[in-house]
Image (tube, rainbow, N blue to C red):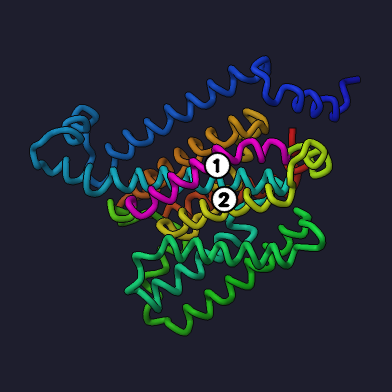
Amino acid sequence: MGEPKHIDTERDIQILNSEKDPRTKKRFRTLFIFLLLCGIAIVYGVMVGSVSIPLKEVWGALFSTADTVEKQIVWDLRLPRLLTGLLVGACLAVSGALLQGVMRNPLADPGIIGVSAGAGLVAVIMMIIFPEYIHLLPLGAFLGALIATFTIYFIAWDGGISPLRMILAGVAINSLLGAVMSTVMILYSDRVQAVLPWLVGGLAGRSWPHFQIIWPYALIGLLLSIFAIKHANIMLLGDEVARLVGNKVERSRFFLILLATFLAGAAVSVAGLIGFVGLVVPHFVRMIVGNDYRFLLPISALAGAFLVAFADTVARSWFDPIELPVGILLAAIGAPFFLYLLRGGIKGWKMS
């Protein structure tokens, strides 16, 4: 008979901060692969579209001083959209990884537990009712996500936070906010047309101003996630063990959820309600590199960045002359994976 599962968990805890972990080489290799894939996604995204640009001309378009058509296409249309997609994917993936870890549940995701819905509701209200304040959209989206998070936290609180109660409260709040959003859209039906592409999630028309909106928030959130690694790893041990080693469990949980909320709000503010990235990417990465957040977070960020950037390139170039919103394509990828988790994949999921 093989070793009991708890032995594997104890071994993982012992080598969590050890350079002797036999998986370290595999993890660094995976990190390098996804870094390379992000570079490939950028080059491929710059090359393809309604006007194809050969690889040998891409370098000239990027660095030439001549004002050519290719340079305008690369600099004004494709590159800002790609870079925005990279940041959106990284934010959503890291947000999902943090939520899954703190709730110890593979189904935790900004879109499922109501965080994205809170950001989305405020964003829709700002775009439809207060368009003159559109420059404050990232802040509004974050505040919406924060209010949703506090509401979920309040409902789930019972002398402490149960991850299961929080997920159930999040699902309920998600439905409620969706109903409110639908009501706003009905009341202002004459202004809804401009919001519809945003609701399904997409990067069409994203330019340098959109990139300038998200990059400061993404940079702050991703840098803070580095400081969250220690807390996230300790939370893997369970509440009781975490308390025994001196960790303030509720404070750590609140900090991690707040950070996940901030990242999700930043992504939603420029890309709309893109779903399943925070669900699929961390789970996939976890199956490859394990649960050590020193590797899980950076690799999830790179994998999420690659997925959104590459999927957006596919959505805008493979179905020409139609351009699909990337949210639709990602939903087509994520929904079967979600069903896999529900039907059996969740049974083999463990925090180890």
On screen, residue 165 versus residue 260, left or right, reads: right
* Mark 2, residue position: 259
Residue 217 higher or lower than 15, as above or below: below
Name which residue lies at 35% across and 71% down. 133
Q: Position of residue 224 (x, y in %)?
A: 52, 43
Look at the image and tell me in which quarter the N terminus lies.
top right
Is any part of residue 348 visible from this angle? no
> Which portion, as a residue range, is magenta?
211-235
Secondary structure state at the residue bearing disc 2: helix
Q: Nearer the viewer, residue 144 or 308?
A: 144
Name which residue lies at 87% across and 22% down. 3
Residue 225 marker: 1
Q: Is there CB contact under 8 Å for labels 1 and 2? A: yes
On screen, residue 171 versus residue 320, left or right, reads: right
Q: Position of residue 35 (x, y in %)?
A: 44, 29
Tell me if residue 226 is in the magenta stretch: yes
Secondary structure state at the residue bearing disc 1: helix
Amino acid tagged 2: Leu
Residue 80 higher or lower than 213, as above or below: above
